[in-house]
Image (cartoon, coloured by chain):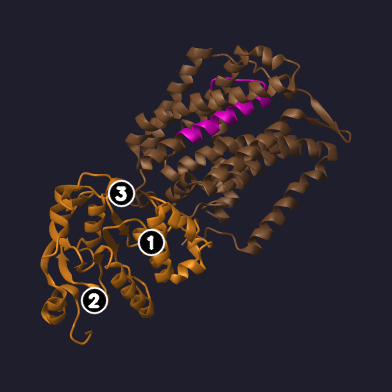
Amino acid sequence: MVQTTLKPWGLKLAIGGAIVLYLLPLLGMDLKTYLTLTIAGLAMGMMLFLVASGLSLIFGLMDVINFAHGVCFAWGAYVAFSTFRALNKWVTADSVFYNFLIFFIAIAAAIVVVGLIGVIIERFLVRRVYGSHLFQILITFGGMVVLTEFIRILWGPNDEVMPVPRTFRGNWDIFDIIVLRYPIISIVIGLLVYGALQLVLKKTKVGKIVRAGVEDPDMVQAMGHNIFLFFTVVFAAGAGLAAVGGLAMAIFNVQVYPDMGDAYLIFAFIVVIIGGLGSITGSLVGALIVGLSYNYVAYLLPPLAVGVNILIMVIILLIRPTGLFPAGK
Amino acid sequence: MSETILKSDAIHTFIGQHHILQGVSFEAKADAVTVLIGRNGAGKSTTLKTIMGLLPASDGKILFKGQEIQSRKPYDIARLGIGFVPEHMGIFADLTVEENMQVAMLREDAATTERLERILSMFTALKDFWRAKAGILSGGQKQMLAIARAIVNDTALLLIDEPTKGLAPIIINALIDAINQIKQHSVVVLVEQNFYMASSVGDHFYILDDGKVVHSGAMEDLVQNQELQSKYLGISKADG
């Protein structure tokens, strides 16, 4: 049987080892650069967490490999892009209130639109191919292509500059260290989403049924719960989380483009594999590992930036094939 | 004469290309424990999964309180008042014992609370591990939790698949006591290979072989019939 929990000493060793490992880049840079990269890495990690947590839940609960998850990320970014354009005066207003208001309106719009896309994908594509990974890959890949083409039709094929609410631009000077505002905001948002997800999954009946479904969906059905309804809800929620991730990343990069989901889908799969299927905490830890590693290595050895994450994934898979925090499947 | 709660009428079930159930018919009557026995691969577990809707019946009828259920979804069947304890127990290891029970509870009314209290007085170990993750429970405690979840609702029929598998004799005796208590409130259909357990709680038996019922009758008749035990259950006189 595959071991799914770390022994206490193993956990301490892993945390200690990770701290030492993530202090190593200090040998190759000064403290200010290290802190700047750490904040950027944490911010990137939080945005990846938003994408990966949905993918992990869909993978863990429904055993569905969803290649259309990346395009949900792109759709989230484009819906926010249109929302910002439509209410541009609140984006450019010299008012923290209006800047945050438009930001939260964009988040709500992205969740609603992309959540509905998620419902459509689940009901009309994925539901036909439950139990067959090959067909899931083919059909969701097809869905991704179609939805990406819809982006090109609706918003055009070219890259666009993402409007950024005024408050989110610029930086703070904290003890002579220049800290960009938006990464800090995105770290806070990531933590809030993580907290909200944990609250829903651990404290509500729906959350408990979803967690139970990750372990044994047949048993959940045999207890009188319509698992397919939960599948639809989780798929829509997963798509909504990807949309928030796309929106956050588009603001971070000040750019939207139709294929933007592809690159981040690869990162999301790496995060899910590192963190363990179906685990929100696993997604958070995996995303932070990927975000920090990417930023440190991109500074020190730029050509190895993506490769280092694949290397970490391989090492973790060799040590713990089920990932760091697998749900008890 | 007791009322028939469950009637399986010539059900056929395929798993992939394999024709597992080839016309299984049996009845479970009120105020009784019906035991399905037979060798490995005879179709006992498949019968319970088919009743529960987890495997589709390709032919035949399943009637619960006179209502056809063979085309219904598992969650509909469960909501009719059928509880299921699978062979692997289906414990949610990452959830606490309390959370396992909460997932099982379809209502949180006074009657359910009263049933929960009765269950916890029957399976006291669950109370001791109430806030612990179910994955750390022993085999016997997991079986108790699996049964507790299945009877916490207003369960008219309880389907239990091989509850004694891998359990120590002392735990088996505790399970016998538990099933004898449960049968005061629910009709029980038990799949069991352990003849001691089957004969201790069973009122009626059906022997399955190669996906068909080959013998049935009162349990006391089977206890007396060494030839039948030897032929279908592999029990010799020396074992007895």
Q: Residue A251 lies in magenta, yes or no?
A: yes
Q: Are marks 1 and 2 in contact (CB under 8 Å)?
A: no
* Residue segment shown in magenta: A236-260
Say which residue appears at 72% left-offset and 15% top-offset: A93
> Which x, y percent locates residue B67?
17, 48
The image quadrant that residue A183 belongs to is: top right
Q: Under tag 3, what secondary structure?
A: helix
Up the image or down, A232 lies above or below B131; here it is: above
Labels 1 and 2 in the same subunit: yes
Residue A221, disc = none
Q: CA distance from mark 2 to mark 3?
A: 31 Å
* Residue B224, image x, y percentages: 13, 82
Chain in brown colour: A
Q: Amino acid at mark 2?
A: Phe
Tag 3 subunit: B
Residue B115 circle label: 1
Chain identity of mark 1: B
B8 horizontally vs A61: left or right: left
Residue that carries the numbered disc 3 in the rendered image? B79
Tell me which amino acid carries mark 1. Answer: Arg
Q: Which mark is residue B195?
A: 2
- The chain ID associated with circle 2 is B
Give the prevailing secondary structure in the magenta stretch: helix
Q: Considering the numbered disc 2 on the image, is that residue within a helix, a strand or a loop?
A: helix
Please tell me which of labels 3 and 1 falls first in the chain.
3
Outermost residue on the bottom side: it is B238
Mark 1 or mark 2: which is in front? Answer: 1
For image coordinates 50% across by 58% down, the residue present is: B96
Q: Colour of chain B?
A: orange
Q: Label 3 sits on what residue type? A: Arg
